[in-house]
Structures are given as C-alpha cells and as structure tokens.
Amino acid sequence: EAGVAQSPRYKIIEKRQSVAFWCNPISGHATLYWYQQILGQGPKLLIQFQNNGVVDDSQLPKDRFSAERLKGVDSTLKIQPAKLEDSAVYLCASSLESGSLSEQFFGPGTRLTVL
Amino acid sequence: AQSVTQLGSHVSVSEGALVLLRCNYSSSVPPYLFWYVQYPNQGLQLLLKYTSAATLVKGINGFEAEFKKSETSFHLTKPSAHMSDAAEYFCAVSGNTGFQKLVFGTGTRLLVSP
C-alpha cells in the first residue's frame, strides 16, 4: 500500500513570509497527525485530527500556525508569518484509529528553512 | 504527564558488537512505550512497542527491549550490530487510555563502524 505522502520535501523562505505544507495519509486512516521536529530534538505533536475534527491542538502556536483536514482525508498545515525558530522538519503521520496502540505511519517530512 | 530521557545523543559500536540504547521514562499513568527508527531523509518507522503484556518485547530487524518498572527503563538492544542499523533511534511514551499522544525523547544516533 502507498505510504504517507508529503509535499514539498524542502522549502526555504524568509521570515515573515507564509508557507503551506500538504499531507496525504494512507487510504482509510481516520487519524492524522502533524509533528514538528527541530534539529537535535524529537518530534513534537502539533495537532491531531480524527477524521476532520481536531482531537488535540494544545501545542499548536495558534497565532501563526493553522491546519485543516477538509473531507477527512488530505491535510494542510500553514505558517503565517514564519519566524526563524520555525525552521524544522514537519512530519505528517496517519493511523487507522486514534488510540495509543494504533500504529502511526510517518511520511518523509518537509524540511523548512526560515532565513 | 509523560516524558522520556534518552541517555547519549550518539552511540558508536563496531559491526557485530552489542547495541544498547538507553531510555528512561516518567509517567503518571501506566505507560505504553515505543521505539522508532529514522533513516536519513525518511520518516519514522516503528521498531517495537510495549503494551503491558510481555515485558520483553521483540521487534523488527532483530531488536528487542525490556520493560523494567522498578527502573523505569525501556532500553533497546540488538545482539550484533549491522552497518544498516546506522540511524537515529527515538524512544516514546504515551498513556494507555483514550487519545493519548506520543511524547518522544531527543533521540540517539547510532554509528556502526566496520
């Protein structure tokens, strides 16, 4: 089966610009996650969707980050305006269900560099 | 709240030597524990998970981990390292009920020399 797809793979922008990332989860997976992985750190959950509803967005900086999952399939994560500290790899993952035991499958990530 | 601490940001071993990557956890509820591997420019892949059944968990690629409640540890081992094991390894913890999110450690980079 096809894995989690993400695009673009790399993005370089200047601070205060806007950027958007796209994720296509594994077909049939109800739960979708966006993680931020800063260099030298482990992934940190930004937002979790169950179908098209938000389950957890407690660590999403809502003044500049937004995410949506229209129709419960694809998702986009947007940063507006970007700051230097947003430089990171943004990982999308999906799982069949929302419970802790439902394995999360990760995409290759989008590497964002903010200059 | 849950957290994990991975001791050693880098571990170097020779091919054929024992691999030991350390992880200690903190959790206010009974935990589920996970090890993930990340190869360069790839996403994370699940190696193995502890879900309160057997304390010794076997995973893919010959890795295993033992849950020790008394030591709050979940160390990852492999008897004989292979060059292809060179990657970054992340330990993660979650609670065992409901919408429990994964909390990752900072990772350990495994270097394997010939």
Image (cartoon, coloured by chain):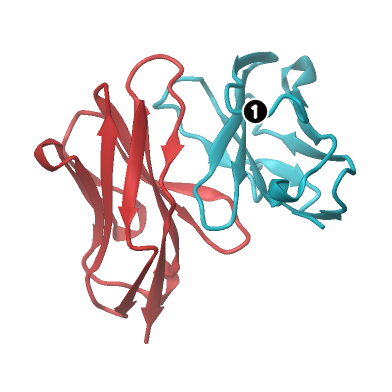
- What residue lies at 75% left-to-right and 50% top-to-bottom? A84
Apparent colour of chain A: cyan
Q: Quadrant of residue B95?
A: top left
Q: Is residue B95 visible?
A: yes
Please give the residue where the numbered disc 1 appears in the rendered image: A60
Return the x and y of residue A95 as percentages of the image width and height: 54, 29
Label 1 secondary element = loop
Residue depicted at 35% across the width and 59% down the height: B61
In the displayed orientation, state which residue is furthest to the bottom. Answer: B114
Nearest to the observer: residue A114 or residue B60:
A114
Image coordinates of residue A89 in percent, x first then y, are: 66, 50
Please give the name of the residue rendered at 33% of the width and 53% of the height, measured from the top-left corner. Answer: B6
- Residue occupying image coordinates x 28% and y 49%: B23
Q: Quadrant of the N terminus of chain A?
A: top right
Chain shown red: that is: B
**Residue B49 image position (x, y, % from top left):** 32, 39
Residue B39 screen position, x and y as percent: 53, 61
Say which chain tag 1 marks. Answer: A
Q: Which sits in the foreground, A30 or B34?
A: B34
